[in-house]
Image (cartoon, helix red, strand yellow):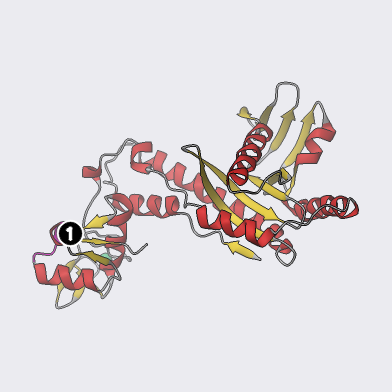
């Protein structure tokens, strides 16, 4: 059973909002676009791998995109598959080109057709995650649970090469389509050894309960001041950010279109980029409306929670 689904990442929603609202004169817009495309590619790669791990759902408990806290630090896992015998962590890699795993220097080299680039070994990273999860489970009274990590290469066209110990790499790194088969192989070995079965649904439940959603302050990453973010309600046809509220509709002067709910995206963008709460005043400023009454009606229609004490509107948890 899949008990934690992969959803469209909040970081990608933030990038979309940011790209709608950066001044055209902003000098690093191409960096922001490149970061967005990289994140989006990563997400698509994850979905490709999920199609393979989904095949295990009838006989295991699956969690996607898990982030846990341990001793004040958080650690992330792309996929966790829990079976009757073991916990499997799957780390997804979206590299294109030729990947060379160097077991001597413990590094990964990627050749994309024109240049070589070095990366920290994903195997070391996977081992660290497995250790952290082991300790985390121990803290939650699941002691000595066997944990294995695999690295799934999302695209079948990526070439995997090894410089050094081929067997070591083959045990851990593989194209995504081989993951279900690999897990089945492990399961057969455990079955024959007569291990005590794990309460996999229960273990999955506790991980799901404690798991947080991954988030990132992208304005800080790109050194963007909140003051530079453009306000206003946007026309989804011509991207004009200066829609005007007339008789309950949003009018776009340049393309002469009328929109009923264009404010919804603007309020969502505000929450994503500015702060997780909004007041009547900041709403009026951001949407360019003058009436308190109109701002109130808009906020009331948005499924938000009103904090009576601080007079703030927040997103429901
Ligand atoms: Zn327009």
**Nearer the observer, 115 or 94:** 94
Where does the C terminus fall, quadrant-wise?
bottom left
Q: Any magenta on residue 57? A: no
Range shown magenta: 282-290
Q: Any magenta on residue 289? A: yes
Left or right for 284, reference 22: left
**Nearer the observer, 269 or 147:** 147
Is residue 47 in sight in this rendering? no
Secondary-structure class at tag 1:
loop
Residue 117 x/y as whole percent: 61, 28
Please state the quadrant of the image where ligand 1 appears.
bottom left
Residue 96 x/y as whole percent: 65, 42
Query: Residue at position x 33%, y 53% from top?
Result: 272
**Nearer the observer, 286 or 140:** 140
Residue 127 x/y as whole percent: 67, 35
Secondary structure mostly seen in the magenta stretch: helix
Left or right for 146, reference 21: right
Quadrant of res 63: bottom right
Q: Which residue is mark 1?
A: 279
Residue lying at the far bottom of the rendered structure: 247
Left or right for 217, reference 192: left
As displayed, is residue 254 above or below residue 23?
Answer: below
Left or right for 19, reference 307: right
As displayed, is residue 311 above or below residue 90?
Answer: below
Residue 174 x/y as whole percent: 76, 44
């Amino acid at each position: 059973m899949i008990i934690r689904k992969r959803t469209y990442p909040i970081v990608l929603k933030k990038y979309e909002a940011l790209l709608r609202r950066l001044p055209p004169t902003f000098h690093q817009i191409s960096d922001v676009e490149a970061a967005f495309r990289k994140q989006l590619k990563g997400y698509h790669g994850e979905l490709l791998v999920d199609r393979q791990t989904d095949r295990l759902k009838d006989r295991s408990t699956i969690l996607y995109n898990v982030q846990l806290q341990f001793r004040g630090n958080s650690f992330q896992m792309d996929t966790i598959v829990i079976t009757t015998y073991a916990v499997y962590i799957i780390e997804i890699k979206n590299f294109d080109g030729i990947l060379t795993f160097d077991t001597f220097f413990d590094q990964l080299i990627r050749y994309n057709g024109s240049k070589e680039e070095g990366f920290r070994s994903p195997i070391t990273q996977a081992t660290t995650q497995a250790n952290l999860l082991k300790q985390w489970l121990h803290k939650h009274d699941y002691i000595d649970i066997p944990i294995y990590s695999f690295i799934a290469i999302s695209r079948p066209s990526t070439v995997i090469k090894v410089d050094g110990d081929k067997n070591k790499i083959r045990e851990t790194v593989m194209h995504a389509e081989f993951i279900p088969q690999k897990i089945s192989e492990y399961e057969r070995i455990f079955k024959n050894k007569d291990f005590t079965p794990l309460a996999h649904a229960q273990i999955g439940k506790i991980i799901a309960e404690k798991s947080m959603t991954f988030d990132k302050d992208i304005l800080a990453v790109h050194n963007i001041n909140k003051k530079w973010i453009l306000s206003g309600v946007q026309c989804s046809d011509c991207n004009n950010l200066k829609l005007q509220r007339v008789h309950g509709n949003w009018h776009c002067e340049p393309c002469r279109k009328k929109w009923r709910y264009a404010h919804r995206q603007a309020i969502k963008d505000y929450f994503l980029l500015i702060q997780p709460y909004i007041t009547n005043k900041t709403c009026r400023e951001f949407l360019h409306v003058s009436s308190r009454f109109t701002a109130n009606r808009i906020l009331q229609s948005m499924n938000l929670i009103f904090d009576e004490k601080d007079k703030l509107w927040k997103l429901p948890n």
